């Protein structure tokens, strides 16, 4: 439970394993110029866990801007959510 509390939800199973008392980092799908993390989905509805997953990636990587892009929408502009952490 401690590892999940530290890392946050939505990571790959391997990210929650401890290796030599260190937390294994997540494998990010797409990082643009080390400035923006892009998480791509194709789901009927974006749920809070999808945003939490992206926030976990952002926190672990130290990258403060993320885009959650859902391709399962009529107009792509309706499927883009920008997240920023300070």
Image (cartoon, rainbow, N blue to C red):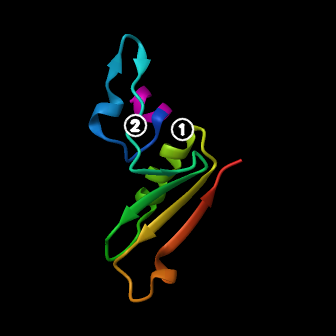
Residue at the right extreme of this rendering:
86
Task: State the residue at coordinates (61%, 49%).
Answer: 35
* Nearer to the camera, 85 or 35: 35
Indicate whether 77 appears above or below 39.
below
Residue under circle 2? 26
Label 1: element kind: helix
- Residue found farthest to the front: 33
The image quarter containing residue 21 is top left
The answer to whether marks 2 and 1 mark residues whose Cβ atoms lie closer than 8 Å is: yes
The magenta stretch spans which residues?
1-6
Residue 3 among those drawn in magenta: yes
The picture quadrant where one finds residue 1 is top left
- Residue at point 64%, 48% (across, down): 64
Q: Secondary structure at mark 2?
A: loop
Q: Is residue 17 left or right of residue 62?
A: left
Residue at figure coordinates x 28%, y 37% from the top left: 13
Mark sitting on residue 45: none
Image position, residue 37 (x, y; %): 51, 52
First in sequence, mark 2 or 1: give its number: 2
> Which residue is the site of mark 1?
61
Crowd rating for badge 2 (residues with CA inside 10 Å; few <14, some 14–19, many 20+): some
């Amino acid at each position: 439970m401690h590892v999940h509390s530290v890392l946050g939800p939505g990571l790959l199973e391997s990210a929650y394993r401890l290796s030599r008392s260190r937390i294994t980092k997540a494998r990010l799908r797409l990082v643009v110029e080390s400035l923006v993390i892009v998480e791509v989905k194709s789901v009927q509805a974006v749920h809070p866990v999808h945003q939490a997953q992206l926030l976990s990636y952002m926190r672990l990587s130290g990258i403060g801007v993320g885009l959650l892009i859902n391709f399962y929408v009529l107009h792509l502009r309706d499927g883009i959510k920008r997240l920023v952490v300070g």
